[in-house]
Amino acid sequence: MNIVRTAKFWGTKWKIKFCNLDDDTYGDCDWENKIIRTRDHDLKDELLLDTLIHEALHACCPWMAEYAIAMMASEIARYLWRLGYRLPEDKDANQNTA
C-alpha cells in the first residue's frame, strides 16, 4: 500500500505523519507547520478513520470548536464505515515517523 504523506487543504500542502504520540492523544494538527500527526501503534478500523477525518477537519476549519469537529468527524467516519470504507490491512508496513 502507498501511504499518503501529503494532502492539500484550502490549497495548502500539509504533511501527514504516522508516529508515536502520548497515550491519550490520537492525533494532532499543527497549523503553523502544516503537519497532521496520527498515532501509529494502536489505532484501528473506525477509530483510525475518525481520527484522520478529525485532524483533516482541523486543517480545513481551524476556527471551529473542538466539540463541533469531534461530532462531525465521528458522524462522517460512521457514515463512511457503514458504506464499507476500509484501509488496506498493511498500513503498518509503510509508516513514516515524526
Image (cartoon, rainbow, N blue to C red):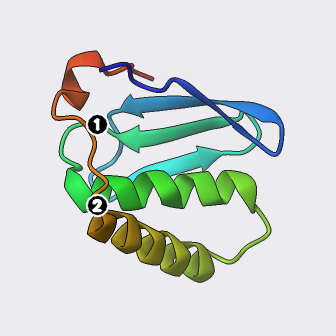
Q: How many marks?
A: 2
Q: Give the structural element (helix, strand or loop) at label 2.
A: helix
| Mark 2 crowd level (few <14, some 14–19, many ≥20, 10 Å Cα) | some
| First in residue order: circle 1 vs circle 2 | 1
Residue identified by numbered label 2: 47
Amino acid type at image mark 2:
Leu
What is the number of the mark on residue 40?
Answer: 1
Compared to residue 28, the image places residue 54 above or below, namely below
Q: Give the structural element (helix, strand or loop) at label 1.
A: loop
Q: Residue at x 52, y 49 (%)?
A: 28
Amino acid type at image mark 1:
Asp
Side (left or right) of 14 relative to 95? right
In this view, the residue farthest toward the right is 11
Q: Residue at x 55, y 54 (%)?
A: 55
Q: Quadrant of the N terminus?
A: top left
Q: Quadrant of the C terminus?
A: top left
Q: Residue 65: x, y in percent?
A: 68, 78
Decide if residue 25 is in sight here.
no
Side (left or right) of 83 relative to 98? left
Side (left or right) of 63 relative to 50? right
Q: Residue at x 38, y 32 (%)?
A: 18
Give the label, 1 or 2, closer to the camera.
2
Q: Quadrant of residue 11?
A: top right
> Pointer 1 and pointer 2: residues touching (CB < 8 Å)?
no
Q: Residue 32: x, y in percent?
A: 77, 39
